[in-house]
Image (spheres, rainbow, N blue to C red):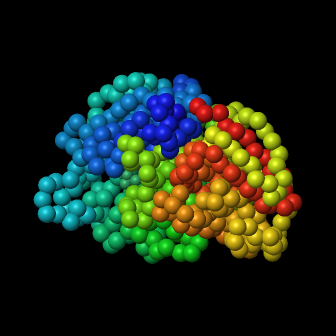
Amino acid sequence: MNRTTGNETKDPYRLKLHLTPPAGWLNDPNGLCQYHGTYHAFYQYVPENALGKGRKCWGHAVSSDLIHWKDEGIFLEPDRPFDRDGVYSGCAWTDENGIHLFYTGNVKEEGDYDYIHEGRQAAQVLVETKDGSRAGEKRLLLTNDDYPKDCTLHVRDPKIWKENGRYHMMLGARKNSGQGAVLLYESADMVTWEYVGEMTTKNPFGYMWECPDCFEMEDAAFLSICPQGLPRGEFQNQNVYQSGYVHLKEGIAKPQIVEAEAFTEWDKGFDFYAPQTFTDEQGRRILIGWMGLPDIEGEYSNPTVGDGWQHALTLPREITYEAGRLCQRPVEELKRLRRNEREVKTGETSVLSEGIYEVEIDKIEINQKDINQKGINGMEPASCRICFNQDLVLDYKDGVFSMKFLNRTGAGRTVRRAEIGSLEDIRIIMDTSAIEVYVNQGSTVFTSRYYPVSRESRVMIDCEKSRIRLWDLESV
Ligand code: FRU
């Protein structure tokens, strides 16, 4: 969202295509939906503080095409005893009566508590709105007494859907046993909810599952969760917390044991968490994530804090199920912003002056063992390499795709890797201080913030036997 003040030297990293907070802090996308043609994106928002310390509200933006967003200010704020310390994350359910928003009201009692088993209240709350312009009464649905006794007080982030005439709710939870889980509830009227059981793994798979989501695609059922507490690996779970999906053998509404071995991360980059999906009026399943992560202090940072704001939402991505894998692609509407298509040769350096552009490399015909023996700038040879200035490098070698920051432009970010097998295509969207990289039809994605020193980008692509195209993207 373009909120430039005209003074670009003051806020050089303001994003042009991504939804950002006007000022202050943003985290999870909430209440995503399309209603009577209009797309709504609510988000976790602390207006007065770029570090997220303060009153957690829901911000609100609307769009007619998922690309041009209009800021609508604060939609929900903590103004009731049960949401005193934050209007936390939640979702939207739409029907002929309007938009029904569900969220978690957070309360932290004053005192010397461990805040896991005591001193906390988690309320599930419903607010209705006819069209997104004004919120109705907040209705309390569930409180601490309504959760199973083997759960801690970390229960939040409702997701609602309807199936066979009944409403279903899932909540992310942390059990006393130190195991993450999803709690399932059912209702006939969206107001009175009954507990029906849980989804969890046989052996612990993280201590907490935040922001659950679920959907069906071509007869396959998926659960999306954000587990906290997984061990880091060389190719897996490289961030502090994870975000990914698993197949559900028994559909999305039944309590069941979840097979964690098949957990696939949504995104392998540095900045991605808490995604939410919804179906739009064309029937597309669209995912938007938070381009950020909680609790990364000391690891890496965002210099935009100095300009009074932090974080963004990812581009809206259409999800498809192809050959047994979920693929993500920026929604088709983004292509309308393409300008000045040109084809470049391998090894050529292109100069892009505005910092928002798209690169597509397809028809790639290298196999895992082909190494481009040239190497560049003292770097190890690779089969395919893309260099942004002398700052950021994407490369592919021996079946591994990596994103590497070579200097301070990563603000502490270093390297992320994914095993992808052979390389078929790469699509890159660069937006001032954000990069999204879609590999192999979006079956692997890397999302990251990037803080180049100049708006002018020198992009060098070394990928023999491929077609390389570039576009400038129009700022929105
Ligand atoms: C995930 C999360 C949610 C919570 C919200 C609070 O980032 O921790 O579980 O509802 O953020 O802002």
Relative to 225, 443 lies left or right:
right
> Which residue is painted at 44% across and 53% down in the image?
302
* Residue 225 visible, this angle: no
Q: Position of residue 404 (x, y in %)?
A: 60, 65
> Which residue is painted at 35% across and 32% down in the image?
74
Q: Position of residue 122 (x, y in %)?
A: 27, 51
Q: Position of residue 149 (x, y in %)?
A: 26, 63
> Which residue is painted at 57% across and 63% down in the image?
405
Relative to 37, 255 lies left or right:
left
In the image, residue 210 sits, relative to residue 283, either above or below, namely below
Q: Quadrant of residue 415?
A: bottom right
Q: Quadrant of residue 447?
A: bottom right
In the image, residue 106 sits, relative to residue 18, either above or below, namely below
Q: Quadrant of residue 466?
A: bottom right
Q: How many marks?
A: 0
Between 207 and 63, the one lying in front of the other is 63
Q: Position of residue 263 (x, y in %)?
A: 56, 66
Between 227 and 63, the one lying in front of the other is 63
* Residue 299 visible, this angle: yes
Q: Quadrant of the C terminus?
A: top right
In the image, residue 379 sits, relative to residue 92, either above or below, namely below
> Which residue is painted at 28% across and 30% down in the image?
137
Relative to 352, 231 lies left or right:
left
In the image, residue 227 sits, relative to residue 33, either above or below, namely below
**As drawn, which residue projects farthest toward the left?**
111
